[in-house]
Image: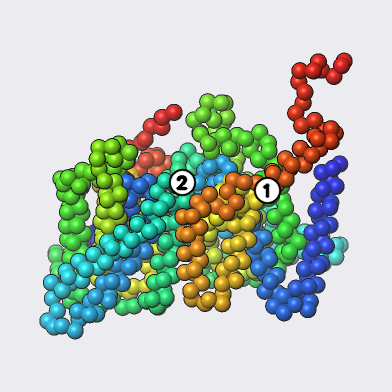
Amino acid sequence: MKRIFFVLSTLSLLGLLQWGVTTLLLDGPIRQGPYYYQILILAGINIVLAVSLNLTNGIAGQFSIGHAGFFAVGAYMAASVSYYAGPAIRGLVGFLPLAGQDAAVLLLALAAAALATALAGLLVGIPSLRLRGDYLAIVTLGFGEIIRVLILNIDAVGGARGFSGIPKLSNFFWVYLLVAAVIATVGNLLRSSYGRAFIAIRENEIAAQAMGIDVTRHKVLAFVISSMFAGMAGCLFGHYTMYLHTNSFTFVKSFEIIIMIAIGGLGSIEGAVLGAVLLTVLPEAFRGFESYRMIIYSLALILIMIYRPQGILGQASVLKRLGARMAARRSAQGNVPVTAPAADGGNGG
Amino acid sequence: MESFLQQLINGISLGSIYALVALGYTMVYGVLRLINFAHGDVYMLGAYFGFYLSRILQGRTPYHLLDAALVMFLSMLGCAICGLLMERFAYRPVRRASRLTMLIIAIGLSLLIENAGQLIFGANPKFFPQLIPESHIKLGGLMLTNQQVIVLLTAVTLMILLNLFIYRSRTGKAMRAVSFNMDAAKLMGIDTDRIIALTFALGSALAAAGGILVSINIPGIDPLMGVMTGLKAFVAAVLGGIGNIFGAVLGGLILGLAEVMVAGYGSSTYRDAIAFLILIVILLFKPAGLLGKGAVEKV
C-alpha cells in the first residue's frame, strides 16, 4: 500500500514538474529556455548512465569500460522499433488519444531496448566476468568498440550516415521517471542480500566465495542490470535527439561515465548523481572560455583526483545519514525499537 | 601469392610500429600496474616534434639520412622529457592511491594533451615532410619502398637495444626487480622513484620513435592520431601478456598482420574491430595473454 502511494506520488510529482518545465522553459518567458531544457534532459540521461555503471564498477567492484556500447545497443534497438514498427503500433492502439499512442510506442521501444541490452549484457558478461581487474576492463572496452563497429556496418540503421527520422517521444517526464527507477532499483538492491553480496565480492572475491556467495552469478546479475538501464537511457536519448550516430558512442563516452562516478565518489548513488550533473553542467558553463574549455576540464579532473582521490562525496551517503538520524529520533521517542531486544524474555507469550 | 607476401610485409611493418608503442605500455604497466592511457598521445607528440624539427632542419641542403636520424633522436629526447614531467607531476603524487585514481588521471592527462595539442598545433592535419626521399626496391615480384625497409630496421634495432638494456645492464636488472616486487626492491636499496621515472622516459622515447616512423610512411599527422593507435597498441600489449617485453612485440605483430589482412581481403570497415575481436578470443582462452604468467591470488 505504502509502495503504491509512493509510486503514485512520484508519478504525479513528475507530471507536475513536466508541466512546470514545459511552460517555463519551452513555451515560457525565459530566454534560451529550450537550451536549459536540453541540459536538463541530458543531465537526466547521464544520471541514469552513471548510477547504473556505478552498480558494476562501484558497488560490485567489476571494472567495466564498455558502458557506451550498451547505451548504443539500447538507443539503436529502440529507435528501430519506433521507426519501423511505430506506425503499426499506432494502428493497434488507434483508439487512444495522440499522447497515449506516443506513450505506447515509447514504452514498447523502451521494453525492446531493455530486453536487447539485458541480453547483450548477459552475452558479454558470462565469458568476460571470469577475467579480473585490468583484463576485464580492456575486454569490456573491446566489446564496446566491437558493438560500435557492428552498428556502423548495419545499413538498416543508417550505418555511417547515422540514423535519422526517429520520432521525438521522450521528454522530461520519461527521463526523470527512468532516473527515479534506476535510483530506486540500485538503492533497494544495495539494501538487499544481493547488494551485500555485491559489496562482499568487491571487497574480497575469495572471501566472498568462501562465505558461499555464487560470485559469477552475482557479477553477471550486476552487469546485466547495469547494461539494461544503460540501454533504456539510450532509448530515451535517441527519442530526444531524433538522430543517432555511432560517433556519440565511442569509448570516450564510456570514459566520461567513469569520470562521473569517480568524481562523485565511487560506490555512492548520490556521488554518481552529483558527478553526472557536474559533468553535464560544467562543460556548458565553461562555454565562454571557448577553446580553453576542454583544457580547464581535463586539468580540473587531474587536480580533483590528486587532491581528493575518493571523489567529492566519497563513500558518504547523505540519504543513509539522514535515515540514521531519523531512526535515532524515532527510537528516542520510544515508538520504534531500533534493535530488537533479544534477551528480555520474548513477548510475554 | 605475391599480393599475399606484399600484405605480409605491410602487416609486419605496421605491426612493428604497434610493437614500439606497446612496449611503452607494457613497461609502465610492469612497474606501476598502471594503464597509461596518455601514452598514445605521447606518440602523437613525437610525430609533432619530428614535424617541427624537420622544418627547422629543412632549410639546409643537402638533406640526408643523418638529418633524419637527428630529427628522430631529438624527438625521442623531447618525448622522454614529457614522460618524465608526466610521471613527476601527475602520477607520483598519487602513487599510493587506488588504481582507479591513477587510471582517471591517465584519462585526464590524455584529454589534456589532446586538447592542448589542438590548441597549439591546430586541429587540422599537417603534412609530415619527407625525411627520406622515396625510392622503390624490387625484390622478386615484390615492391618495397626504402621507407618501409628503414622503418622496419629502425624498429627492430630499437627493440634489440631495449632488450639488451633490460636484460644485460644493471639498471635494467633494477627495473625488472621493481616490476617483480616494488617493496622488496626498495628494501634492497634500489631507488624505485628513479627507476619508475626512467621507465616513463624510455617508454615515451619509444612512442616518439613510433610516431615518427608512422609519419614517414603515412605523412598526415593530427592531434588525435594517438587515440586509436594508442588503444590498439595497448591491446597488443595485453594480447601478448602485459608486463612482458616479448609479449608486446608478439602482440604488435599479430595485430598489425591481422589488420592488414582484414583490410586487404575482407572489408576495411571492420579493420578497427578485428583488434578487439582477437583480443577477446585470446583472453577467453588464455586470461593472462599469450606470454603472460597467470598470477595465483593468495588469500
Q: Residues within 10 Å of mark 2 (few under 14, many from 20)?
A: few
Query: Mark 1 touching mark 2, by CB under 8 A?
Result: no
Position above or below: B85 against B50: above
Tell me which amino acid carries mark 1: Val
Chain of the residue that carries numbered disc 1 in the rendered image: A
Distance (Cα) linking label 1 and label 2? 23 Å
Q: Is residue A15 left or right of residue B67?
A: right
Secondary structure under tag 1 reads helix
Badge 1 and badge 2 in a common chain: no
Q: Is residue A196 left or right of residue A259?
A: right
* Of B31 and B1, the residue lying toward us: B31
> Which residue is label 2 attached to?
B98
**Image quadrant containing the N terminus of chain A:** top right
Tell me which amino acid carries mark 2: Ser
Residue under the image location 24 percent in, 64 percent down:
B76
x and y, in percent, of residue B247 in the image: 28, 46
Chain of the residue that carries numbered disc 2 in the rendered image: B
Q: Say which quarter of the image contains residue B145.
A: bottom left
Residue under the image location 18 percent in, 64 percent down:
B149
Residue A66 visible in the shown view: no
Q: Is residue B16 left or right of residue A271?
A: left
Residue under the image location 28 percent in, 71 percent down:
B49
Tell which tag, 1 or 2, sits nearer the viewer.
Answer: 1
> Which residue is label 1 attached to?
A318
x and y, in percent, of residue A233 in the image: 64, 57
* Of B41 and A161, the residue lying toward us: B41
**Image quadrant containing the C terminus of chain A:** top right
